[in-house]
Amino acid sequence: MKITHLPFLRILAGSVALLLVGMLFVRFVGTTSGSNEVQSAGSGPYRAEKVNLALRRTAHHLLRLAGDSTSRIPPVEQPNDRTFRVAFSRAFNYDSLPTLLQESLRIHQVNGSYDVAVLDCARGELQLGYSLTDLLAGSPIPCKGRSMAAGCYVLQLTIHPVAPAPQPAMPWSLVALAGLCSGIAFIAWRRSARVVGPIGQSSTLPDQAIRFGQSWLNVGNQLLTSGSSQYTLTYRETKLLRLLISHPNEVLARNQILKLVWEDEGVTVGRSVDVFVSRLRKLLQNDPTIRITAVHGVGYRLEVQE
């Protein structure tokens, strides 16, 4: 007998293959999601850096409120995956800490629950502290209003792991239907696949992309798309551009940029900001809606036209 439904058989075979792959993937994800979630909550490649920057920003503003604009903020210590510490050589305004820390964590996109403790440097004893639940409940922050004696203190931030969401059981009939539909869609896509035009002619945003003006920054891949061109950035260029994007049309002081982009690695070079800003200007020259301007004697501002 002559077979006349070869395309249908191909679709069916592709669907079965995709169904089997999907089942294996679901099984694998179900057994490993717990451990992966804990790791990403505390020691992922970008999460630790974000917590570091948020804690340093908080320390900077606490010192400024205390009238100290010259003291150097020491590097943030990380004794384990979820604990971050920064030391103060003088007392600070504890009442301002909850609002400043929460704002810093929001700016650097650090989510999840956390505990805050103020320790004595000499003995490591707990002096003051609170948790995010106290802040969200709207109740008075524990120990608020207490005065702090002059001395050395350690601000400790402990991030809690994100609990994995429960996965409801999926009916096998739904899995089979999803596999069949996926196979049909995949084969149809393969038959209609075409070459994509140059960068800038597609309206689809890349994964992990941050849009500003008519440009996009893919932080994970360190790629900048501006106009019809795409550039691979260095780690420092990506870090600096991400900082400027997070504060559009705002003036960032030179010292603040140095602290957030360089000092956490223990390297601070006065001319580094000017050199890297000059590079970014050249890469963004094809985007007429973006301009990095220098504010004389202060720092830089990323101007974005809507």
Image (tube, helix red, strand yellow):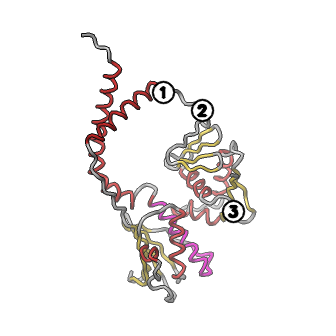
Depicted 131 relative to depicted 47: above or below = below
Q: Nearer the viewer, residue 144 or 78?
A: 144
Q: Nearer the viewer, mark 2 or mark 3?
A: 2
26 lies left or right of 237: left
Query: How far from the left and from the top, in percent, is residue 257?
Result: 61, 62
Of pointers 3 and 1, the one earlier in the residue sequence: 1
Measure how far apart labels 2 and 3 are at the Cα level.
36 Å
Label annotation for residue 299:
3
Label annotation for residue 193:
1
Give the structural element (helix, strand or loop) at label 2.
loop
Label annotation for residue 198:
2
Give the structural element (helix, strand or loop) at label 3.
strand
* Residue found 75% across the figure and 63% down from its top: 296
Disc 1: CA contacts within 10 A as few (<14), some (14-19) or many (>=20): few
The amino acid beneath tag 1 is Ala
The amino acid beneath tag 3 is Gly
As drawn, the residue found furthest toward the right would be: 296
Q: Nearer the viewer, residue 169 or 102?
A: 169
Q: Per the image, is 57 magenta?
A: yes
- The stretch in magenta equals 48-72
Disc 3: CA contacts within 10 A as few (<14), some (14-19) or many (>=20): some
Q: Per the image, is 164 magenta?
A: no
Q: Main secondary structure of the magenta part?
A: helix
Measure how far apart labels 3 and 1 are at the Cα level.
48 Å
